[in-house]
Amino acid sequence: MVSCGSIRRVVGAFGVAAWILALSAASAMAAGPQDCEVQVSPRAAPAGSVFVFTGSGLRPTELTLQKQGAEPVSHDLDVADSGEWEVTTRSRIGDEGTWTANFIDPALTCTASVTFRVTLSSTDLMDDIAAATSTAATPWSLYLAVVAIGFASGMLMGRMRTWVRA
């Protein structure tokens, strides 16, 4: 049979656990990170593209870029005191992969992170050729040359036909 003493112990243990949880949540909210935000545009682009990072809610002094599976590289930053800021970086051939950019603001004990991808460059030459020739106007002399060669070929074929009969 369950006695009142054992029920009180269980309720008391749950009460102490709830009280500890409430205290830890309150301290975490008081010392938690600020509203630090960073976005990147574009999220994915081929090597050689420029990635633009925009942020608010922090004034980062350090940028750490880390490719997945590689050592991080840190850069010092000096952004304006205004609410929003912008930092750009250009990728290079060989940078292909998933990257994480960490913006660190030691004054606010705030770190904002964003992930982006550097993709392979296009190796499709036909698209490049079609794009280059589709915008250029074809000269009239080329049309005239095609028509003249066609007319001359027809005349020659007609002459050859009469020579074969004779």
Image (tube, rainbow, N blue to C red):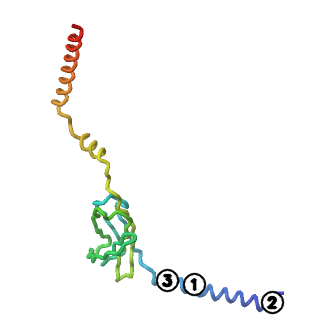
Residue 116 occupies which quadrant of the picture? bottom left
Q: Residue furthest bottom?
A: 5
The amino acid at mark 2 is Ser
When the figure is inspected, residue 50 is found, relative to residue 13, above or below; the finding is: above
Q: Mark 3: which secondary structure?
A: helix
Disc 2 from disc 3: Cα separation = 38 Å
- Residue 80, image x, y percentages: 26, 74
Q: Which residue lies at the image location 28% right of the left edge and 42% below the top edge?
A: 130
| Chain-order first, disc 2 or disc 1 | 2
Residue 166 occupies which quadrant of the picture? top left
Residue 28's tag is 3
| Chain-order first, disc 2 or disc 3 | 2
Disc 2 from disc 1: Cα separation = 29 Å
Q: Nearer the viewer, mark 2 or mark 1?
A: 2
The amino acid at mark 1 is Ala
Q: Nearer the viewer, residue 119 or 80?
A: 119
When the figure is inspected, residue 10 is found, relative to residue 160, above or below; the finding is: below
Q: Label 1 belongs to which residue?
A: 22
Left or right of residue 1, residue 130 in this image: left
Figure quadrant of the N terminus:
bottom right
- Residue 99, image x, y percentages: 37, 68
Q: Badge 2: few (under 14), some or many (20 or more) residues near its Cα, within 10 Å?
A: few
Residue 129's tag is none
- Residue 7, image x, y percentages: 75, 88
Q: Mark 1: which secondary structure?
A: helix
Q: Label 2 belongs to which residue?
A: 3
Residue 97 occupies which quadrant of the picture? bottom left
Q: Mark 2: which secondary structure?
A: loop
Q: Residue furthest right?
A: 1
- Residue 5, image x, y percentages: 77, 92
